Image (tube, rainbow, N blue to C red):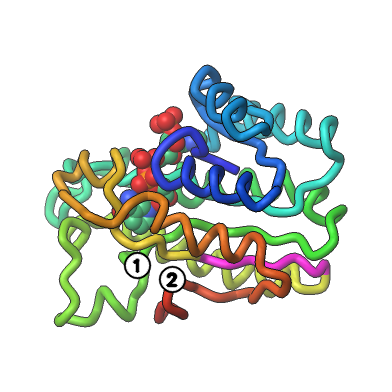
Amino acid sequence: MTGANRGIGAAIAQGLAERGLTVVVGARDAASGEQTAQRLGGRAVPLDVTDDGSVRDAVARVEQWYGRVDVLVNNAGISGGHAGQLAGEADLAVMRAVFETNLFGVVRLTEACLPLLRKADGARVINVSSGTGSLAWQSDSSRAFASSQIALAYPASKAALNMLTVLYAKALAADGIAVIAVAPGACATDFAAALGLSLERTAEQGAAIAVHLATVPDSPTGAFLQDDGPVPW
Ligand code: NDP
C-alpha cells in the first residue's frame, strides 16, 4: 500500500496487520517505512508513486517476496495547498502535480500491480478518494466543504479517481478483481493541519472503511463508500 508511513495510510496499515494481513509498507521515506513495517511485522519498500522506476522496483520486490498481491491500497495523496489552485489564479504546474500523485500515481501503480493482482484469488484495489470528489456533494449548496470549496485541483483529481475506479472495476471484473473508492471523511492528519483545518475525526476512524473492505469476505466493486454506506458520485 502507498503512503503507509503516516496519517490515514499508517492507520490502514495498522488495521490490516491487526486483521492478520501481511502489509507491504510503501513509503517515500525509506527509514520511516522500515520503522512502520517493523512495528507491523511486515516489509517496507521505498515507493514514490510519481516515479516510474520507484514503482517498477517496488513491485519487483513484492513479486520476489510474495508472488502475488491480494489487496492494493492506493492511499497516497496530496492537497497541493491553496496557492495555484484557486479560481482566477490556477497554476497548471500546481494542478499537474496534484494529478500526478492523486490520479496518475494510482494508474502507474495499479498497472504495475495488475499481473500480481491477477495471481491472487478475489483480489481488490482500494482507492482512497474523498467526499470532495463527489460531483453530487460539490453541487449541493447546502453542503459546505471547509477548504476544498474553492480549490480546483484536489477535488477534480478525486472526481477523476472515482471515474477511474468505475472504469477499472468494469475492466477487471472478468479477472475477479474488485475496485472500490472510499471516502475516509475529514480526519486530523498532517494533510488537514496544513490546510489549517482543526478536526476531531481520527486517522483510525478514517481508515476503518478501507480496512473493512480489504478484509470483508465478499467485496463490492465499482462502488464509492464511506462508513455508513454509499457516497453519491
Ligand atoms: P497525509 O498528508 O497525512 O499523508 C499522506 C501520505 O501520502 C504520506 O504517507 C505521504 O508520504 C504519501 N505521499 C504523498 N505523495 C506521495 C508520493 N508521490 N508517493 C508516495 N507516497 C506519497 O495525508 P492523509 O493521511 O490525510 O491522506 C491520505 C489519503 O486520504 C489521501 O489520498 C487524501 O487525499 C485522502 N483523504 C484525506 C482526508 C483528510 O481529511 N485527512 C479526507 C479525505 C481524503 P510522505 O510521508 O513521504 O510525505
Residue 97 visible: no
Residue at image point 66% right, 37% down: 24
Specify whether 110 is left or right of 163.
right
Residue at 85 percent of width and 61 percent of height: 121
Residue occupied by mark 1: 131
Label 2: state its secondary structure.
Answer: strand
User: Where does the magenta region start and end?
Assistant: 175-181
Residue 83 in the image, given as x and y percentages of width and height: 17, 41
Checking the image for residue 226, the label placed there is 2
Q: Is mark 1 within 8 Å of ligand 1?
A: yes
How many circles with numbers are drawn on the protein? 2
Magenta highlight on residue 20? no
112 relative to 223, above or below: above
- Amino acid type at mark 2: Gln
Give residue 179's quadrant in the image.
bottom right
Q: Residues within 10 Å of mark 1 (few under 14, many from 20)?
A: many
Quadrant in the picture for the N terminus: top right
Q: Are marks 1 and 2 in contact (CB under 8 Å)?
A: yes
Q: Residue at x 55, y 37 (%)?
A: 49
What is the secondary structure assignment of the residue under circle 1? helix
69 sits left or right of 200 in the view: right
Tell me what residue is drawn at x 54 percent, y 43 percent: 14
Residue 59 position in % (x across, y down): 73, 35
